[in-house]
Amino acid sequence: AGLAWILATPLRPLAQEPDSVRAFVGGDLLLASPTGEFAENVSRGIGIEGHAGVFVTPGDEIALRANLGFINYGNETIKICVTQPCRVTGELTTSNNIFFGGIGPEAGLNSGALRLYGNATVGFAYFATTSSAEGSHNQGDPFASSTNFDDLTFAWTSGGGAQLLVYDGPNPVRVNLGLRYHGNGEARYLRKGDIQDLPDGSVALNPRRSDTNLVTFHLGVSVELGLDKAEGSP
């Protein structure tokens, strides 16, 4: 009986559920730098990312985090005639984008106002080249759009960074500076100049195939939330 009491005692605090769930949300601006074969075909890109997560340990040590974002790595705009004869003109803009998302663990280490972290995810990378037509000088919303080419790959990420506490209130705010590697694997994609307009009005696509790995540099914010459990919940 004494041995059973000793073994059970340290487990009791772990069995007690906290009164609230600690979560966080935030967003980053991204600067993307292609690597390897991808760097030979495309230049740097810019983008944004949103993230959300929940801490699974009493402190900030371990969290489960999900992210979703996109990177633009090239645009091309040409003048078009909306009518024949060409009395109404417009602009045709083609954009090359990567949409990505994933979920995975994050481990952190607090040292005063500074939090160091590392994270990893598994998810997807979606490469899409789209064209949209709108009035001249960006007047009005696009009145027509189409996806010229796309491809979807399994992707993983791994990275880390530092967060500096800038507001220590009910919902603490941290400024984030980080670096992440995106292992997108091999994909087919278009870059600027890979769509040719032919004399008969049709188009020819010249997709490229290569590894599409890249590194992203992050600058953003993260806000911590305390979510109270509903009254009467177990």
Image (spheres, grey):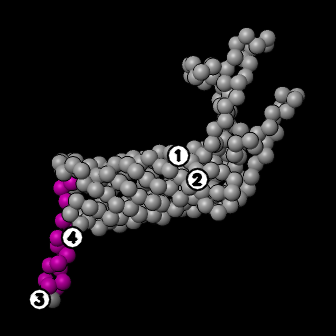
Gap between marks 1 and 2, in whole Å?
15 Å
Q: Answer yes or no: do the residues labelled 4 and 3 have beta carbons within 8 Å?
A: no
> Marks 1 and 3: which is nearer the front?
1
Q: In the rendered structure, which amino acid carries the disc numbered 2?
A: Ala
Give the percent coordinates (x, y) of residue 39.
Answer: 64, 57
N-terminal label among 1 and 4: 4
Q: Which residue is denoted by mark 3 in the rendering? A: 2
Gap between marks 2 and 4, in whole Å?
38 Å
**At numbered mark 2, what does the secondary structure look like: helix, strand or loop?**
strand
Q: Is residue 178 left or right of residue 55?
A: right
Q: Answer yes or no: do the residues labelled 1 and 4 have beta carbons within 8 Å?
A: no
Q: Identify which residue, 63 or 178, lies in the foreground.
A: 178
Q: Which residue is denoted by mark 4 in the rendering? A: 14
Whether residue 33 is situated above or below residue 158 in the rendered picture: above
**Labels in figure, total:** 4
> Marks 4 and 3: which is nearer the front?
4
Q: In the rendered structure, which amino acid carries the disc numbered 3?
A: Gly
Specify whether residue 224 is in view. Answer: no
Gap between marks 4 and 3, in whole Å?
20 Å
> Marks 1 and 4: which is nearer the front?
1
Give the percent coordinates (x, y) of residue 190.
Answer: 71, 46
Which label is found at residue 194?
none
Gap between marks 1 and 3, in whole Å?
63 Å
